[in-house]
């Protein structure tokens, strides 16, 4: 087995692994990982064929994210995933990143704990399947028109406080790809909440979703449901946010799977978790 840095030429092979796993990422998402830091993204090869992937993103060197740890099912049991994960940790430690974070499945959590990762909080993925999407492309255009460009600056500044680091390069990319799914609500000149959305291979993904109160959280979720034109919607909800969970249930979302946010090192920049309804995604943070 050979480990090396990922390049854009590897994206088709990475997409094949993603499809086998049934995940929602697109080629654009792989490009986002590489643009954030190609040297920190890796592939594993067997006999010259890509059989595994792992990605990292550093946020202001405050902490880094590990994601997209994928292994071809035909090659499992050979320690490929463990080697890839060890490679990401070695790379980030060499960069002197003080904290590494990831979102672990129940199957992966024991391995991460052995490597020194600790639980931070619990997340659940909830999905909504709509048999007939009422929103039309005309409403998508209207949603874009409803968003004043000046609002994005306020959202990005607030998100740095909420997330714990600057990730504006990611959020700007999401907004450029799906402007209809970006929203912000202000009151008396102050931002009260915001959402972004990502167009995946089979579903629109809501996140991050931040709100200061239940009224704002509901309004933002309703807007996303109106402005998305997809049959399947995904939200990665923080279990500690009771209001967000109640809203998802009331709008027909159903439980899909659990995740545990974990960290290794000094978690000096946890952000404002109490304001978060849903994360951007387990691959991005």
Image: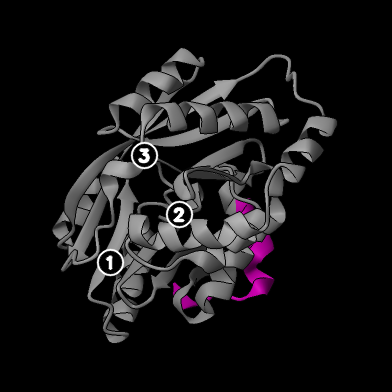
> Label 3 vs label 1: CA separation?
27 Å
> Label 1 vs label 2: CA separation?
13 Å
Tell me which numbered mark, 3 or 1, is placed earlier along the sequence: 1
Q: Is residue 254 left or right of residue 34?
A: left
Q: Mark 3 Cα within 10 Å, few/some/many (few <14, many 20+)?
A: some
Query: Is residue 13 located in the magenta-colored stretch of the structure?
Result: yes
Q: Which mark is residue 100?
A: 1
* Residue 204: image location, x then y, percent: 62, 37
Q: Are marks 1 and 2 in contact (CB under 8 Å)?
A: no
Q: Is residue 119 left or right of residue 254?
A: left
Q: Could you say which is closer to the camera, residue 3 or residue 15? A: 15
Q: Which residues are magenta?
A: 1-16
Q: Are marks 3 and 1 in contact (CB under 8 Å)?
A: no
Would you name the residue on which mark 3 appears? Answer: 212
Q: Which mark is residue 283?
A: 2
Residue appearing at x 49%, y 50% in the figure? 189
Q: Is residue 86 above or below residue 193?
A: below
Q: Secondary structure at mark 1?
A: strand
Q: Is residue 240 above or below residue 250?
A: below
Q: Is residue 238 above or below residue 126?
A: below
Tell me which numbered mark, 1 or 2, is placed earlier along the sequence: 1
Q: Could you say which is closer to the camera, residue 220 or residue 83? A: 220
* Residue 241: image location, x then y, percent: 29, 32
Q: Secondary structure at mark 3?
A: loop
Residue appearing at x 64%, y 69% in the figure? 10
* Residue 111: image location, x then y, percent: 22, 53
């Amino acid at each position: 087995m050979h480990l090396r840095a990922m390049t854009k030429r590897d994206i088709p092979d990475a997409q094949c692994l993603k499809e086998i796993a049934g995940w929602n990422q697109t080629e654009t998402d792989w490009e986002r990982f590489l643009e954030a830091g190609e040297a920190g993204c890796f592939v594993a090869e067997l006999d010259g064929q890509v059989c595994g992937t792992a990605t990292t993103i550093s946020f202001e060197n405050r902490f880094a994210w590990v994601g997209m740890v994928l292994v071809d099912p035909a090659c499992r049991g050979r320690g490929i995933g463990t080697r890839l994960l060890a490679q990401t940790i070695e790379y980030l430690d060499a960069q002197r990143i003080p904290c590494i974070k990831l979102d672990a499945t129940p199957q992966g959590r024991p391995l991460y704990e052995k490597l020194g990762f600790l639980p931070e909080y619990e997340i659940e993925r909830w999905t909504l399947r709509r048999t007939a999407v009422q929103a039309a492309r005309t409403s998508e255009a209207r949603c874009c028109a409803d968003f004043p460009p000046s609002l994005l600056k306020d959202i990005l500044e607030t998100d740095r406080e909420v997330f714990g680091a600057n990730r504006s390069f990611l959020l700007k990319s999401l907004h450029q790809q799906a402007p209809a799914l970006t929203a912000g609500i202000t009151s008396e000149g102050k931002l009260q909440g915001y959402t972004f959305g990502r167009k995946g291979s089979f579903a629109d993904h809501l996140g991050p979703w931040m709100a200061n109160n239940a009224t704002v959280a509901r309004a933002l979720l309703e807007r996303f449901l109106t402005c998305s034109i997809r049959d399947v919607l995904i939200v990665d909800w923080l279990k500690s946010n009771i209001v967000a969970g109640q809203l998802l249930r009331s709008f027909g979302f159903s439980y899909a799977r659990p995740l545990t946010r974990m960290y290794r090192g000094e978690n000096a920049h946890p952000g404002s978790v109490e304001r978060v309804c849903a994360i951007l995604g387990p691959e991005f943070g």
